[in-house]
Amino acid sequence: MSAGVYVALLRGINVGGANKLAMGDLKAIFEGAGCSRVQTIIQSGNVVFAAPAALLGDLAGIVAADIKRRFGVETPVILRSGAEMRAILASNPFLRAGVDPALLHVMCLASRPSREQIGALDPDRSPPDEFVVRGKDIYLHLPNGVARSKLTNVYFDRTLRTIGTARNWRTMTKLCVAAEHCAARTE
């Protein structure tokens, strides 16, 4: 059975000294769940790995439960395929408009929000910040930085009734490159 390449994004790992989790332990959890060619990227809960598609349906829950059981840390685990990562990078409306990539973030959602939920978002919640929702991803332009924005995980989680985790554009690019390297190793 051939393996596809995926990226796992864990929310709130090793941020501000909270929810500490060693990347070696995180790698071991993914390997124990049946993943191969596991690589962690940065120290904040980003994992690139290969796995058969049949494993994916339960993988996020298995990993989250194992982290909670072993380390007492509750963290959502959001998965994207290598192809989805490439599509995220290719579809950023702010990058196309010439915005400085240092001001860009992407929030990956666990599930696709409905049109009604998206319509409930307030585009004027945090000026001059901007966002665009596309499928299960939210593109963010945060000119004053993420720390000053009111476009938070809590706001999007509550309004869209799902769970999300954000990464800056540089990290998203690194994850996509790592996924491409992982795919090259599987061929």
Image (cartoon, rainbow, N blue to C red):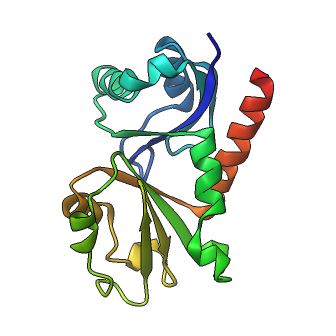
Could you tell whether 91 is left or right of 17 in the image?
Answer: right
- Name the one closer to the observer, 142 or 124: 124
Could you tell whether 127 is left or right of 4 in the image?
Answer: left
Location of residue 146 in the rendering, given as x and y in whole percent from the top left corner:
45, 72
Location of residue 51 in the rendering, given as x and y in whole percent from the top left corner:
57, 20
What number of labels is visible?
0
* Residue 41 visible in the shown view: no
Could you tell whether 97 is left or right of 181 in the image?
Answer: left
* Residue at point 47%, 17% (across, down): 54
* Residue at point 45%, 45% (across, down): 14
- Name the one closer to the observer, 74 or 37: 37
Q: Is residue 82 above or below residue 36?
A: below
Of the 4 image quadrants, the one containing the C terminus is top right
* Residue 13 visible in the shown view: yes
Specify the quadrant of the image occupied by residue 160. Answer: bottom left
Location of residue 60 in the rendering, given as x and y in whole percent from the top left corner:
38, 29
Q: Residue furthest front?
A: 115
Location of residue 26 in the rendering, given as x and y in whole percent from the top left corner:
50, 27
Specify the quadrant of the image occupied by residue 89. Answer: bottom right
* Residue at point 49%, 41% (across, down): 45
Of the 4 image quadrants, the one containing the N terminus is top right
Q: Is residue 30 above or below residue 184?
A: above
